[in-house]
Amino acid sequence: MKRAIVVALGVAVVASSAAGFGISAASRSAPPLMQCTQAADTDVCRMRVAFAARVDLRARIEARYEADRAKCAPLALAQKDACLIAAHAARGRALLEAASPYERRS
């Protein structure tokens, strides 16, 4: 019994120290904009910032879509279908609006 307790405590110590390393590593990483001040190539920097902004916008659109779908859960049959269709349409419009500044103009 004592051995099991010692092993369990040892595993807990190792797991908590590994989590501490993960947290400190995450806090050291700078956001893309902060890394760009140190970069010599401004085109790469601009692309990195634009990509990060697009990813963030896409994540916000998806979160809003999931929240809208969650609002549809308590509804019944036809109301639920209409609610889901409206949520999907709102997501589509938001994605189109988000993509419009990035489309190529010929």
Image (spheres, rainbow, N blue to C red):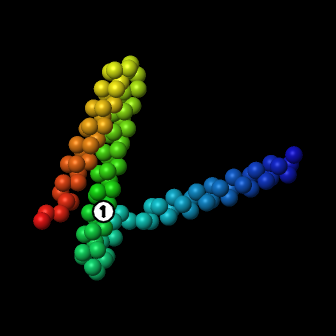
**Residue at far bottom of view:** 40
Task: Say if residue 34 shows up in the picture.
Answer: no
Q: In this view of the protein, which residue sits in the foreground, 46 or 4?
A: 46
Q: In the picture provided, is 66 more to the left or to the right than 53?
A: right
Task: Say if residue 91 shows up in the picture.
Answer: yes
User: Which amino acid, by three-letter code, is at mark 1?
Assistant: Phe
Residue 98 place in picture, x, y as percent = 23, 51
Please report the residue visible at 41 percent of the width from the left and 26 percent of the height from the top. Answer: 73
Please report the residue visible at 33 percent of the width from the left and 39 percent of the height from the top. Answer: 65
Task: For the C terminus, give its image quadrant.
Answer: bottom left
Assign a secondary structure to mark 1: helix
Quadrant assignment, res 47: bottom left
Residue 29 place in picture, x, y as percent = 42, 65
Q: In this view of the protein, which residue sits in the foreground, 104 or 61?
A: 104
Pointer 1: what residue? Answer: 51
Which class describes the residues within 10 Å of circle 1: few (<14), some (14-19), or many (20+)? few
Please report the residue visible at 33 percent of the width from the left and 56 percent of the height from the top. Answer: 55
Residue 78 in the image: above or below residue 40? above
Please report the residue visible at 18 percent of the width from the left and 54 percent of the height from the top. Answer: 100
Quadrant assignment, res 20: bottom right
Q: In this view of the protein, which residue sits in the foreground, 90 or 16?
A: 90
Quadrant assignment, res 64: top left
**Residue at far right of view:** 1
Residue 85 place in picture, x, y as percent = 30, 32
Residue 44 place in picture, x, y as percent = 28, 74
Q: In the picture provided, is 32 more to the left or to the right than 26?
A: left
Q: In this view of the protein, which residue sits in the foreground, 54 or 95?
A: 95
Q: In the picture provided, is 1 more to the left or to the right than 40?
A: right
**Residue at far left of view:** 106
